[in-house]
Every structure is written in C-alpha cells, then in structure tokens.
Image: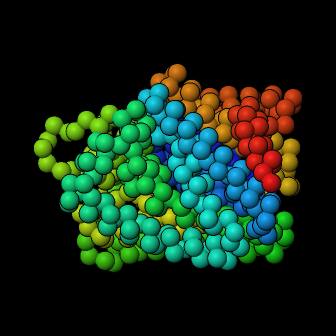
Amino acid sequence: MDFARGLAVFGMFAAHVGPTPEVGGPLGALMELANGRASALFATLAGLSLAIMSGRAEPATGLAGRRARAKITIRAVILFLFGTLLTMTGTSVVVILAYYGLFFLLALPFTRLRAVPLAILAAVWAIAGPVLSFVVRDWLTSTGLARTLIAHDPIRMIGGESAVQFFLTGGYPVLTWMPFVFAGMALGRLDLTAVATRIRLAIIGPVLAVAGYGGSWLLVRLVPGANFPPRLGGPKAGDIAKGGDFPKGGDMPASGGVPNISELTENGEPMGAVPTDSALRLLGSESHSGVPFEIVGAVGVAIIALVGSLFLAEKLPKWCLPVTAVGSMSLTAYVLHVIAIDATGSQPGAPVYVLLAFIAGVVAFALVWSRFFRRGPLEFLLGKATAVAQKLK
C-alpha cells in the first residue's frame, strides 16, 4: 500500500507543480491522468487505512473497537487543525488535510460495517452525494443564505476554509468525496493478499473506469445540451485556492447580486463542483467536478493503481523502494511539498524539470530518513498523539 501512496503523492505533485495537460503528447496524457485522480487515490487509500485501523477484514468490536475509534478521532482532529493552520498561511495549494479530518470523523459510524455494505454505501453516495450537492448549492444561492453562511463562518474569518467549502464547493467537498473513503474502507475489509481477490479487483477496476468515463463520454454526446465545453486549462491548484467561496475574512463581492457559489473562484471557473445552471452537467466526468460518472471512473482508476502497486511492490521490491519510501511517510511528503511550493513560488504549469526536482527531493529525503527511522517525522508525532487511545478501558 505504501507504493500506491507514493504514486498518489507524486500525482499530487504533478497536479500542483507539473505541466498542464495542454502540453500534449505522452507527458500531457500523464498530467491529465494525475489531475484529480491522484487525490482520489489518496482519499481511497485513506479509507483503506481506516479499515486497517478498525480491524481489517473483521470490524473491531468491544474494547478494541472503542480504542480504534478513539484513535481515528484523535487523528481526525489533528489533521483538521493542522490542515487549517496550513491554509491560514495563505498557501496557494488547496490543502487536503483538513478535509481528511472531516472524512475520518464522518466515516466513524461506518467502521462497524463489512466490505459489502461499505461498497453499497459508496455506490449509493456516489450518486446521491452529487445530486444533493447540486440541489443544496442551488437552494443556498437562490435564497441568498450562502452569503450569510460564508460571511459569518468563524473558521473562514481567521483565514481557514468555510463550512460551505468543506461540504459543498471546496477542492475536496465532503458530499462528493466520501464515496472514495467508503470505497477504500470496503477494499480494506478484503483479503488483499489473496490472489482471487486481486483478480476480481483487476476486473472491477477497469470496468468502473470504463463505466464512469466511457459512460459519460457517450451520454454527453447523445443527450442534447449535455456536451458543455471543458473548463479552461482544467482544474489547477491556483484556481481552487478559494474553493468556490468568498475571499477570506468574509468580504463580499463588489456586486450587490447573489452569485452562484459554485462559480466563485478567482477566474470564474467552478472547482470541486459543477455549476447549478443545468442538471445535465451531472452527466459529465471532468476531474474535480464531483459528479457521479467522475467518481465512479476515479474509483476504478484507484483500484487499478492499488492492484498494480501490490503486484509491483511484491515482485520488484528493490526497484519500488524509492516510491515505497515516500509512501511510508506520505503525510510528511505532502506537507514538505506545500512548504516547498510556497518557498519557491512554484505554480501549476511549471516546466517538467520543476516537477522532477520536487520528486527527486522528496525521494532523497525519504530514502535517507527511512534508513534510520521506521516512520516519517510527522507520522511519528501523529502516532505518539494517538497512542493515548490505547489507555482507553
């Protein structure tokens, strides 16, 4: 799993400091693959980790279950606070850590479920979540309540992200990203060491990817009015720095009208959700659009990446070591890349050598650190903080 985490980290590097897909050729295709799907893999692996922490194949019960849920709660609170602090620094990156904290908290009631119920929950949420988000965002805009909620949000006022962002319009809104977490939890309840399980997943992954992206591709061409033009340049970290929200501090736009909350980005392009001008937008599959077909397709890609990672890490462990080392300290690697982006002023669309420098730097750090320590520095501190859960009786 560490190899898959490492791939997800590199994919997020590519989305934040790599060339845009518009460069074309194999490099452009690789950047397009990373765009949105790397963070979806990250969220899916987070769900898998939750399943491992809460008992693996058999959900933990009794004292073990209470300790597991306490550990998850502590981890969630720390990630939320740490992510909010990073956001308050004014970084151009849409920090996923605070969203992770919310994902973990909201997943707590479902840690008692087994693989099949979790898979069903993921499937239902993948359809219901985007529809509910669409309806709620449209209602908040039409009633004018969105402006009030955002203007008076206490976390937003101190420089963090608002509840509207966290649940509806941010880079990784809860309503449309929980399916990745539940899908990961379902995967974590399976015996991933079994050959039969891997074969089934090797079939399910491509089927979901084709159903999601292929189904959307077909529908937007068959349904009149559904083929909307793509967002200019695709989703970029800089575009969603404000996550479909008002400027920090609750300042209102100069216009007296009530804007569409899904379009309140710096360049007018909705991120993390589709505009509410037409329900036909729910038939799309663009990355970071938070629609059913995109979610299904991205889950399929995540499963493919997981199965491939398990195979490669077992067959070629020495060759995979650089990526595995980074994956073993993915939290540290993620935070370091946010700091490096702000320190160097790097932005999406940078030359490929900038991306390669980020990857080389974090690989070198991870390889050296892992020679002397079992866990990354932030992973070690997080482990110490959650160890108190073991004292629960």
Q: Which residue sits furthest left?
A: 256
Residue at image position (32%, 33%) is: 249
**Quadrant of res 339:** top right
Left or right of 4 on screen, residue 134: left
Instruction: Describe the colour scheme in one phrase.
Output: rainbow
Q: Residue 36: where, in percent of width, then height? A: 50, 52
Residue 319 visible at all: yes
Q: Nearer the viewer, residue 158 or 91?
A: 158
Q: Residue 374: where, in percent of width, then height? A: 84, 37
Q: Quadrant of the C terminus?
A: bottom right
Left or right of 228 on screen, residue 286: right
Q: Nearer the viewer, residue 385 or 62?
A: 62
Q: Which residue sits furthest top?
A: 343
Left or right of 137 on screen, residue 354: right
Does residue 54 sit above or below 225 in this rendering? above
Residue at image position (73%, 75%) is: 200
Q: Which residue sits furthest front?
A: 393
Q: Residue 331: where, in percent of width, then height? A: 66, 39
Residue 29 visible at all: no
Q: Residue 254: where, in percent of width, then height? A: 16, 37
Residue at image position (55%, 65%) is: 179
The mark tally for this picture is 0
Residue at image position (45%, 61%) is: 175
